[in-house]
Image: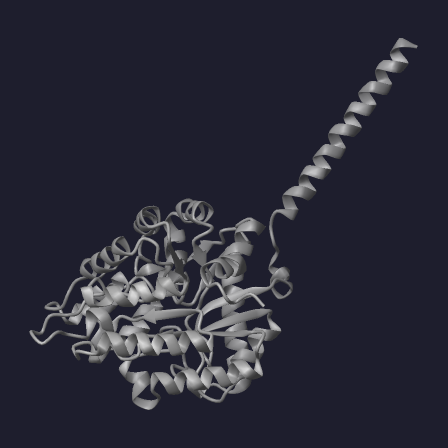
Amino acid sequence: MKNSNTFYYITLLLLLILLQNCTSEEHSEAEYYSIDDFNTIEKFNSHVHLRGDNTSYIEQAIRDNFKLLSLVSSSPGATRSMSVEEQEEEILQKMEVFPENLFYSTTILDPYSFNEPDWEEKTIEHLQRSFDRGTVAVKIRKSIGMEVQDPEGNFIRVDDPKFDSIMAFIEENDKTLIGHIGEPMNAWLPLEEMTTGGDRQYYSGMPQYHMYLHPDLPGHEVHIEARDNMLAKNPNLRFVGAHLGSLEYDVDELAKRLDRFPNMAVDMAERICHLQHQAVTDWQKVHDFFIKYQDRLIYATDESSFGPKPHYGAALTDQSLRTDEQIAEASRENWLRHWKFFVSDERMSAPKVEEEFNGLKLPREVIDKIYLTNAEKWFPGILQ
């Protein structure tokens, strides 16, 4: 009888251990998304530029369960063909067609008139009109720091006192400032030494921003210092650093700013390849960075209405020549590659990265944050 009871309890114990292991394995798998989950998960792309009549990109984004934040541009190239006001009218018309999937960010009306005496007044009037129209953010681009100069020829920095009233107005209206300040570190390197093919492609066609060719202009550290000074002056301003805050080259450097400025987050627009490049040699550091700063990282791509920028050496270098089918295909391929990098631990490659790397396999809760809930937090107003 005693032996029978002993056998019974041992069997029961083994069954409990087996059941616990099965439950643990199921729980472990449930902590992660698979590549196949891509279409089923609601997502937000917080940095695109939707101009022109073609809506193939938007339609593919909707099919793949994305909402989009389109950024109006004050660059000379953009405003030469369409003013900031006209760009706003265009995106507002698109928002009427796709009301549940599109949102927009305005920009500083005309940074190139910075030296005019009524610049602050006109800028605030423009921002008020944009706020009334429903913009969720205001973007300042690299023209501040790299192009606009004062009468003495000094480059205007984003920490200039004339911006103080602008920043205060944005904060008072509970809007987010998106800052594309400076350029990636690669801009100060010769093409052959750049770490990603995307930067080689961009700067070979945009020599005016290839700072290696302009050694007399401010260095990378000057732009970062100006941005940091501006944030120090405005600690309550909600700020999203575009393009990983121009600190894409080292997650440790980016971490220092996120630690210093609790109201700062960053989008990943056109800089995911830099994270992949770092993962080639230090996967653990990149993975741990995402875990630690999971509330401060926002998915973004910097794509246009014609899809992602072609990679360096691509046969088709002008994305505006793509057919509707090519726009949809290139966009989905790019999004799926990003998804694979974030959700799997597979060995993989990317067109803009020279060597292979492993995916980060981030937990579901982290994926949910970087693809949606962080955008909802840092851009109030996108909830429907």
* Residue 162 locus on image (x, y percent): 20, 68
Using the rendered view, name the quadrant where residue 133 is placed. Answer: bottom left
User: Vertically, is 88 above or below 7?
Assistant: below
* Residue 308 locus on image (x, y percent): 44, 75
Image quadrant occupied by the N terminus: top right
The structure residue drawn at horizontal position 82% and vertical position 24%, both measured from the top left corner, is: 12
Q: How is the image coloured?
A: one colour
User: Vertically, is 97 above or below 341?
Assistant: below
Is residue 351 rendered to the left or right of residue 235? right
* Residue 29 locus on image (x, y percent): 65, 46
* Residue 54 locus on image (x, y percent): 50, 87
User: Vertically, is 328 above or below 230?
Assistant: below
Residue furthest to the right in view is: 1
Is residue 36 rendered to the left or right of residue 92? right
**2 or 233, which lies in front?**
233
**Residue 182 visible here:** no
Residue furthest to the top in view is: 2
Using the rendered view, name the quadrant where residue 84 is placed. Answer: bottom left
**181 or 338, which lies in front?**
181
**Residue 332 visible here:** yes
The structure residue drawn at horizontal position 19% and vertical position 64%, both measured from the top left corner, is: 161
User: Vertically, is 58 above or below 279?
Assistant: below
Is residue 1 rendered to the left or right of residue 267? right
The structure residue drawn at horizontal position 19% and vertical position 75%, both measured from the top left corner, is: 147
Is residue 53 rendered to the left or right of residue 29? left
Image quadrant occupied by the C terminus: bottom right
The structure residue drawn at horizontal position 53% and vertical position 86%, both measured from the top left corner, is: 324
Image label count: 0
